Image (cartoon, grey):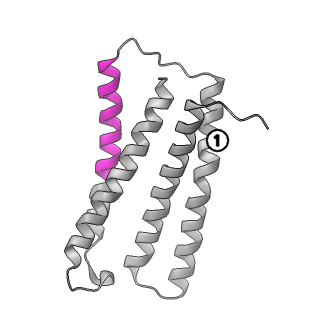
Amino acid sequence: MTLEERRAWIGLVVAVVGYAVYLVVVLGRAGDTPLAEVSYAAPMLWTIGAGIVTAILADIAFGIANPRASHLTDDRDRVIGRLGDRVGHPFVAIGAVAAMLMAMADWAPFWIANVVYLCFVLSAIVGGVARVVVYRGSVPEW
């Protein structure tokens, strides 16, 4: 497994687990309260921060566990990285447009923030899945 493939797996797992933790915390706080009134900012910031730290620590831990692994990236890694970005980035744009429209319609900040967060997570998941699939298969020729 190359360095970049390992990072793709780490990012994919961290995105899924981090968002799942966020949903459990926020939905657990809801109870009988409408979702738009639930305190969401701290759990969102904590799960995003914890996800970043976890990804960094996991990358370091895997590097220590396998010190002989190559740290070089080649053309294939760069092509796969660009492909993953191209597949995942549209979700960021979708989230930005959705947030803009929701703000114009005076939606509650809860919904706007959660749509943006969801789209970032979808971008990470879809881009990560694309990278992993191509690493396990072959780079498409167009």
The residue lying toward the viewer, choosing from 44 and 32, is 32
Q: Name the residue furthest front.
A: 137
As drawn, the residue found furthest toward the top would be 68
Q: Let me know if residue 63 is in the magenta part.
A: yes
Q: Is residue 20 magenta?
A: no
Residue 62: image location, x then y, percent:
33, 25
Question: Splitting the image into 4 quarters, where does residue 76 fall?
Answer: top right
What kind of residue is marked 1? Answer: Leu
Q: Helix or strand or loop: what does disc 1 sit on?
A: helix
Which SS does the magenta portion mostly show? helix
| Quarter occupied by residue 96 | bottom right
Q: Position of residue 109 (x, y in %)?
A: 40, 79
* Of the pair 69 and 135, the residue shown nearer to us: 135
Q: Residue at x 23, y 78 (%)?
A: 30
Label count reads 1
Q: Residue furthest bottom?
A: 106
Residue 19 screen position, x and y as percent: 35, 58
Residue at (43% x, 44% y) in the render: 12
Q: Is residue 120 above or below residue 59?
A: below
Position of residue 44 relative to residue 112, above or below, is above
Residue range highlighted in magenta? 48-66
Point out residue 21 in the picture as x, y percentages from the top left corner: 27, 58
Circle 1: is it few (<14), some (14-19), or many (20+) Cα within 10 Å? Answer: some
Q: Which quadrant is the C terminus positioned in?
A: top right
> Residue at point 26% right, 79% down?
38
Q: Which residue is mark 1?
A: 83
Looking at the image, residue 117 lies above or below residue 87:
below
Q: Quadrant of residue 29?
A: bottom left
